[in-house]
Image (spheres, coloured by chain):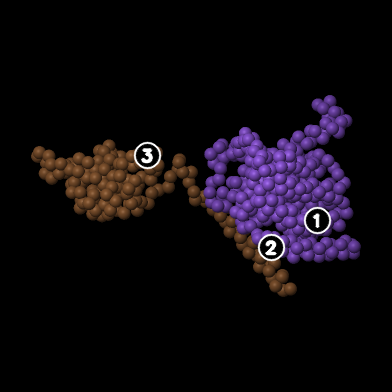
Chain colours: A purple, B brown
Amino acid sequence: MDFIVDIIAKYSLVRILISFSLLIAIIMLNAIVMGYLERKICARIQRRWGPMEVGVQGWMQMFLDGVKLLAKQLIVPREANPFLFRMAPLLCFTPVAMAFAVIPFSESFYAMDLNIGLIYLLAMGSLNVFAILIAGWSSNNKYSLFGALRSVAQNVAYEIPILLSLLAVVLVTTSFNFKEIVAYQSGLLSFWMCQPVAFIIFLVAGCAETNRVPFDLPEAESELTAGYFTEYGGFSFGLFAIAEYGNLFIMSSVATTVFLGGWNGPFGLDFYSGPILGVFWFLLKVFILMLIMIWVRWTYPRVRFDQLMNLSWKYLIPFSLVNLLITAFIVKII
Amino acid sequence: MSHYFSEIFTGGKSLLVGLGVTFKALTSPVVTVQYPREKIDISPNMRGHIDLIKDSESKNGLHRCISCGLCARNCPCSCIVVKGEKQEGVKGKVLKIFTLEFSKCSLCGLCVESCPTSAIDFSDEYELAAFSREAFNFDLLKRVQQGDTK
């Protein structure tokens, strides 16, 4: 055992390999769990049963769906650009895996501790839009292209409120490091209490950034069949779906670390937290946020494109700017 | 400007109301059934194909049909064939053939209403998918003899 620990400590390449294979496993598992929960909760909101056939309460359904996707042939449309068409799912998935590296699951359970963790994570999060644009363009399909264009416009509009709302917190902590941001909230204080406007703005904009209903215009089923991944089948489609849930996890974990106190137990009780319990609290908060996202998804209809733009430019951005100004003012006084 | 803020307030409120509606649905019981294994109760008004009613107290001990042929004559789709025969020592006709070509039937119910002895009624069969048209030529007399009717 000491031997293994020694190797891991000595060679950073081994550490990177181990942490990345673990992270990819977490991403896959997250997609399976979230896919199952999504289908089940959607069904219960519509007063159906949802998957019931495979295993108790259909818990194996997503595994079998994954096997089905793996077994399918990858078809490249004749008119498509084959290289970019094949690249796009990988480009969509890789930034997700890279962003997972800085997510602090607990005080000691993380792959990388960057002092610009927050910036790095947001940069990786916004790389997603390149993959969507490439997927939409290379498919050579009007629906795909429309989905991709919409996605770009949407991401440009919603990146700003996300950054501004997070900046309000960063002004207080004066650090982009996740560990320090969480350490700042170790007592009773979490940032959702003193920055409620930023928290709500972040949640709404994060929902739009991950292209989820009510902001799912890039894939708008009723208008664009499936948007940017219309032409994709098999596991390249699966990678898009996994990346979508991965992005959801990233957004929720940013919200958890920045606003909800990360791995700290609730109410600032110290004896609740620890390296193992820290992971538990972190995952609990993340999953509560993701369940709220699912709940929101199956409640609201899709917004129109002008409504989408109005919400960002007329409501979220002014509010986050005012919030930032007030925060800067208060920080300066104190 | 006041419109701007009131819109945020009313919009936010209606969003919360919407979440409440779905939460109520989420916590209320499921209304669908797992069909091939679970089935819902059939309404008594269900109109399946017609069937001869089994009646052991009737004259022939099986059904009340007197082979009058009123149902066949009233049928707008001509999908019922009724034939009876005279037999030695038996009063009235004895039913020999009673068939229904269900693929033609419009389920109007004129046969059920016109039957003088109330010998026929709607069944509650609804799982009737088949691969050939001939599968819907029901021999109702055979069904009542075999006890397939309700």
Q: Quadrant of the N terminus of chain B?
A: bottom right
Residue B58, quarter of the rendered image: top left
Q: Chain of mark 3?
A: B
Q: Work out how far the residue at label 2 is from the one at label 3, CA to CA, in angstroms.
A: 54 Å
In this view, the residue farthest toward the front is A79
Can residue A285 be seen in this snapshot?
no
Q: Nearer the viewer, mark 2 or mark 3?
A: 3
Q: Residue at the location (63% across, 37% down)?
A: A69
Residue A76, percent from left and from top:
66, 39
Residue A281, percent from left and from top:
73, 46
Q: Quadrant of the C terminus of chain B?
A: top left
Amino acid marked by disc 2: Asp
Q: Residue at the location (32% across, 48% down)?
A: B104
- Categorize mark 1 by other alpha carbons within 10 Å: few (<14), some (14-19), many (20+): some
Q: Residue at the location (24% across, 45% down)?
A: B81
Say if mark 1 contacts mark 3, CB within 8 Å: no
Q: Chain of mark 1?
A: A
Q: Chain of mark 2?
A: A
Residue A85, percent from left and from top:
71, 42
Near-viewer residue (B38 or A298): A298
Residue under disc 2 on the same chain as residue under disc 3:
no
- Categorize mark 2 by other alpha carbons within 10 Å: few (<14), some (14-19), many (20+): few
Q: What residue is shown with label 3? A: B132
Q: Work out how far the residue at label 1 is from the one at label 3, CA to CA, in angstroms.
A: 66 Å
**Helix, strand, or loop for circle 1?**
helix
Please give the label number shown on residue A163: 1
Q: Work out how far the residue at label 2 is from the one at label 1, CA to CA, in angstroms.
A: 22 Å
Q: What residue is shown with label 2? A: A306
Can residue A328 be seen in this snapshot?
yes
- Relative placement, left or right, of A89 versus A16 is left
- Relative placement, left or right, of A131 versus A60 is right
**Helix, strand, or loop for circle 2?**
helix
